[in-house]
Image: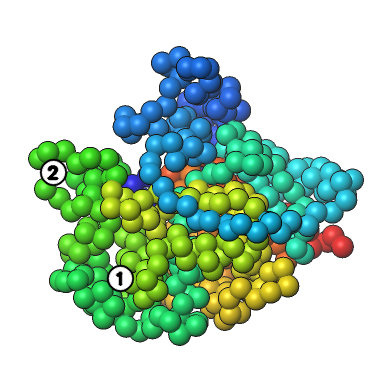
Amino acid sequence: MWFSTSKAGVAAAVVALATGAQMALAETGVLSAQDSDPTVMGWMQGFPPPDERLITQPDANYFSFPKLRWSVCHLREFLPTEEISRGTGAPIPLSYPSPARFADLARQIDALTFRPTNATEDMTWDQSLYANYTDGMLIMHKGQVVYERYFGCLREDGKHAIMSMTKSITGLLAEILVAEGVLDDSLTVKDIIPEIGQSAFATATVREVMDMTTGVQYSEDYSDPEADIWVYSRAASPLPKPADYDGPDGYWEYLQQVGPEGAHGEAFHYKTINSDMLGWVISRVTGKAVTELASERLWRPMGAEMDAYQTVDGKGVPFAGGGVTAGLRDLARLGQLMLNEGALNGKRVFPAAVAQTIAGGGDQSKFSGFPSIPNGSYTSQWWVFHNDHGAYAARGVHGQTIYVDPTADMVLVRLASYPRAQNGFIDPTSLPAYQAVAEFLMTQN
């Protein structure tokens, strides 16, 4: 499924492309960020648009580059969705410095230079935004927005698909339930969902599902038409099934037939089905869909300014592994909520232990296969870098991130439509850029 990431071959890819994502794409003839801008391309412009500028469903090519640069802001035009309501109260405004100070900081940040991983030349912050096909960038420092820009399909009143950052929302909801005693993470999946039957998930603990250390069979090799990802995609499709289709119908029915691969608890394996299993678990223990929980526990109390929405399968089950579309500023609110350890706008939204557990990270000895995050770990569906700043992040394919840096008192949100799905292609540019802006902000009052 196009919201997911993987991949066994990412190590070789990162080594090959670490000299700079933009250079690698140029060598393959891929359009630059400027040339693939949806406005420049003319996608869906006109009444009606000309045939060659249409992006449609069910052709299912709407997520191929460069069409994806328009589609990431328009997913509910292709797929059914369920709302994550912000409620009916007035949004709580974000804080900004004076206009003059804001403009001055933007100029200074754009001019920052850094050295991408394994590169021989420096790059400016501004150049990195185009190199990574950025659609939106917002940085908060000490609780204030100090940088905000929009590109491509995104505007300040628009929304953008966040891909697998959805997993981190699902994981955060689960961690809140654990901290509040509603969910026991030592229970097995079968203890909570007996109808999981003989699925390999049955004997996994909730914590193993949360940390993706389950031993379940699931391949996300997009080049293999028989890979599990395509079986999962067919099961989850909300479109009518072909008359001869005899496979599972929906996310949860697919999870009931997952086979074993390895032992539970031994190693981290990034597999999207864990997130949907977790979504089922937290829905079962609360009696609420993940969309309703996200609204009640996050979007409403944090004073979001826009509703979000989440794609659903043919049975109305939200895609807990990658289906959310949201506004840039609301994602910054979520990041600030994490940085503040569960408090925002003068009130406590969830226990501090939730953010502390996530920031502490998972078992690093079980983490491998992601060379751009050499010292990392994964817990509660969040990526932890274990760097000098104690940074951790929600991450999604094509360049989505909420990057939380406690040492710099910084939250950074990037939304993007990078042509390749794997973040390993982007990290050699992005992670040094984040460190550079964090170090700059630490020098500011």
Residue mark closest to the camera, 2 vs 1 = 2
Residue depicted at 33% across the width and 72% down the height? 284
Q: State the scheme by which the image is colored.
A: rainbow
Name the spot of residue 188 as percent of width and height, x first.
28, 80
Mark 1 neighbour density, 10 Å: few (under 14) some (14–19) many (20 or more)? many
Residue depicted at 43% across the width and 22% down the height? 54
Name the spot of residue 281 as percent of width and height, x first.
34, 71
Tell me: residue 64, above or below residue 166: above
Residue depicted at 35% across the width and 31% down the height? 57
63 displayed left or right of 45: left
Name the spot of residue 369 as percent of width and height, x first.
40, 60
Name the spot of residue 257 as percent of width and height, x first.
17, 62
- Asked whether 413 or 288 is in front, the reply is 288
Residue depicted at 10% across the width and 40% down the height? 244
Classify residue 192 by image quadrant. Answer: bottom left
Amino acid at the residue labelled 2: Tyr
Amino acid at the residue labelled 1: Thr
Nearer the N terminus, badge 2 or badge 1?
1
Residue at image mark 2: 245
Q: Are marks 2 and 1 in contact (CB under 8 Å)?
A: no
**Spatial distance from mark 2 to mark 1, Cα to Cα?**
29 Å
Residue, far top: 50
Residue at image mark 1: 214
Q: Is residue 114 visible?
A: yes
Mark 2 neighbour density, 10 Å: few (under 14) some (14–19) many (20 or more)? few
Classify residue 178 by image quadrant. Answer: bottom left
Tell me: residue 367, above or below residue 10: below
231 displayed left or right of 148: left
Quadrant of the drawing holding the C terminus: bottom right
| Secondary structure category for the residue under label 2 | loop
| Secondary structure category for the residue under label 1 | loop
